[in-house]
Amino acid sequence: MSTAELAQQHEVHALYSAHHGWLHSWLRKKLGCAHNAADVAQDTFLRIITSRDALLGMREPRAYLTTTAQRLMVDQSRRKLLEKTYLAELALAAESMAGYPSPEDILLAVQALEHIGTALQNLPDKARKAFLLHYLEGQTHATIASQLGVSTKMVQKYLAQSLLHCHQALEA
């Protein structure tokens, strides 16, 4: 380590030793929290140490420390306000998005599916299969007709029969 570096290290140590306790007390009164005061005090000294030539010609160390600490507190307040605003906007966006159903919507959907499942149990086998293939798997009438070995017209009748049966079961 060079002589200049040793001298600067000695100045930093002297500044820290002489003023850290005072700065921490001042910040604790300003912030009302010893933990936050300790953080800001540490950040203040870190900012001074890392700034190039900060210690050169410093005549009023307490004024320099308080100015630096106040700037850090302003930066911290801006950051917290920005974070709070961002989180509020994010929450608002999440509420307006249809991507996540509410617990009430989930309950209603489960109850409707239970009713439909019960109604489908009383249908003939081919009508039930046509309903499930079309509405759950999204298959076309022609594909369903091929699988069931019937005409597309018969698939349409099965689907109409299934929907009518489900509607009647839900009204009962």
Image (tube, helix red, strand yellow):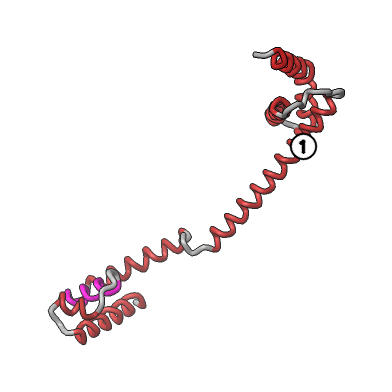
How far across and how far down the image is residue 35, in percent? 68, 28
> Which picture quadrant has residue 21?
top right
Q: 158 or 84: which is nearer to us?
A: 84
Question: Is residue 52 toward the left or the right of residue 155 in the image?
Answer: right
Residue at image x 62%, y 53%?
Answer: 88
Q: Is residue 62 above or below residue 171?
A: above
Q: Which residue is mark 1?
A: 71
Residue at image x 69%, y 28%?
Answer: 50
How far across and how far down the image is residue 31, in percent? 75, 33
Q: The magenta stretch spans which residues?
A: 123-135
Is-magenta flag for residue 49?
Answer: no
Q: Secondary structure at mark 1?
A: helix
Q: Is residue 135 above or below residue 110?
A: below
Q: Is residue 19 above or below residue 164?
A: above
Residue at image x 39%, y 65%?
Answer: 109
How far across and how far down the image is residue 107, in percent? 41, 61
Question: Is residue 158 toward the left or the right of residue 7 in the image?
Answer: left
